[in-house]
Image: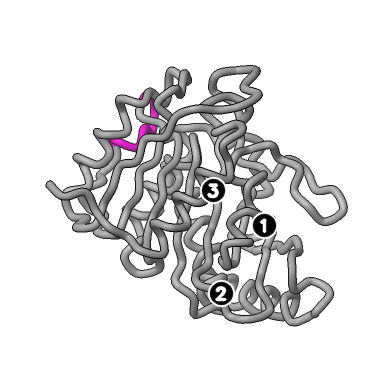
């Protein structure tokens, strides 16, 4: 059933992206289970780009609703999608499965969720020969780690963890990170005040990536217009006001993955 769904999804994606009207960005629906789909926003260059970036937002995991064909989520990755696109990457912002209303920390490590992500990435891989990098933020890093452990070596070229969850159910550093052998960047704001994502936890992720020969920890600091909940998008946790600098750092590292010398 999964193979059939994957083939169907790949065909649908190809048909949608072959239409010039949608070449620069469109909403796609990817079937992942019987009567269940995941909506995603696809920004694709008309000429070959450097890589395909798959963005996994935090919080409840949705795209924040769709308005005029664009996701409205304030999540750091979703609101920064065009910044990545401008760095010559194709960008897919992934929502949640249609039968879910909240991608909790616990649900993000379940076989069902991991299988859904595999279906999405397999469908994208079937219509693109670009290297695929997975980028997660906040709760999205839980999904990212679970996916990388399960099928990362066969489908992915690298990982970027931002504002990682290292406390509570499904925490990134409590998963079997020693099974991951992909180039990995861990990026965190020194001023992150979210209790589930303490800056001190970022280093523990790097230590657990024993199989990864190329891995790096980058700590940034600062923010502008910071306000609201300390675990939400407009605080230090969401790189508020420094999005271009953070995207520059991530993009440069994906272009030239260099690990910490230790």
Q: Tell me the distance, in whole angstroms, between the alpha carbons under discs 2 and 1.
A: 19 Å
Residue range corresponding to the magenta coloring? 167-174
Q: Is residue 201 above or below residue 41?
A: above
Q: Within the image, what quadrant is residue 156 found in?
A: bottom left
The structure residue drawn at horizontal position 55% and vertical position 28%, both measured from the top left corner, is 223
68 horizontally vs 231: left or right: right
* Structural crowding at the residue carrying mark 1, measured as other residues with C-alpha within 10 Å and reported as few (<14), some (14–19) or many (≥20): many
Q: Can you tell which quarter of the image residue 20 is in?
A: bottom right
Residue 7 position, x and y percent, is 58, 78
Among all residues in the image, which is located at the extreme right? 68
Count of marks placed on residues: 3
Q: Is residue 257 above or below residue 16?
A: above
Choose the circle earlier in sequence order: 2 or 1.
Answer: 1
Q: CA distance from mark 3 to mark 2?
A: 20 Å
Q: Residue at x 66, y 70 (%)?
A: 44
The residue that label 1 is drawn on is 40
Note whether 5 is above or below 218 in the view shown: below
Neighbourhood count class around disc 2 (C-alpha, 10 Å): few under 14, some 14–19, many 20 upward:
some
Name which of mark 3 and mark 2 comes first in the sequence: 2
Please provide percent x and percent y for residue 191.
44, 22
Query: Quadrant location of residue 86?
Result: bottom right
Q: Which residue is mark 3?
A: 56
Is residue 31 toward the left or the right of residue 259 in the image? right
The kind of secondary structure element at disc 2 is loop
Q: Position of residue 217 (x, y in %)?
A: 30, 42
């Amino acid at each position: 059933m999964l193979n059939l769904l994957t083939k169907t999804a790949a065909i649908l994606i190809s048909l949608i992206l072959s239409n010039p009207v949608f070449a620069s960005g469109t909403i796609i629906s990817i079937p992942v289970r019987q009567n269940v789909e995941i909506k995603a926003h696809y920004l694709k260059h008309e000429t070959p780009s450097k890589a395909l970036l798959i963005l996994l937002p935090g919080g409840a995991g949705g795209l924040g609703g769709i308005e005029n064909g664009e996701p409205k989520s304030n999540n750091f990755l979703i609101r920064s999608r065009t910044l990545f696109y401008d760095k010559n990457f194709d960008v897919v912002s992934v929502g949640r499965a249609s039968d879910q209303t909240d991608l909790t920390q616990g649900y993000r490590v379940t076989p069902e969720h991991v299988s859904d992500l595999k279906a999405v990435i397999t469908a994208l891989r079937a219509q693109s020969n670009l290297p695929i990098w997975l980028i997660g933020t906040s709760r999205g890093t839980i999904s990212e780690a679970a996916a990388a452990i399960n099928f990362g070596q066969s489908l992915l070229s690298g990982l970027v963890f931002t504002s990682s969850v290292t406390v509570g159910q499904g925490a990134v550093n409590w998963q079997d990170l020693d099974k991951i052998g992909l180039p990995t960047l861990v990026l965190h704001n020194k001023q992150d005040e979210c209790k589930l994502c303490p800056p001190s936890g970022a280093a523990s992720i790097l230590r657990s990536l024993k199989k990864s020969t190329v891995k790096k920890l980058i700590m940034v600091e600062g923010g502008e217009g910071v306000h609201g909940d300390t675990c939400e998008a407009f605080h230090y946790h969401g790189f508020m006001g420094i999005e271009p600098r953070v995207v520059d750092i991530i993009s440069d590292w994906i272009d030239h993955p260099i690990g910490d010398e230790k």
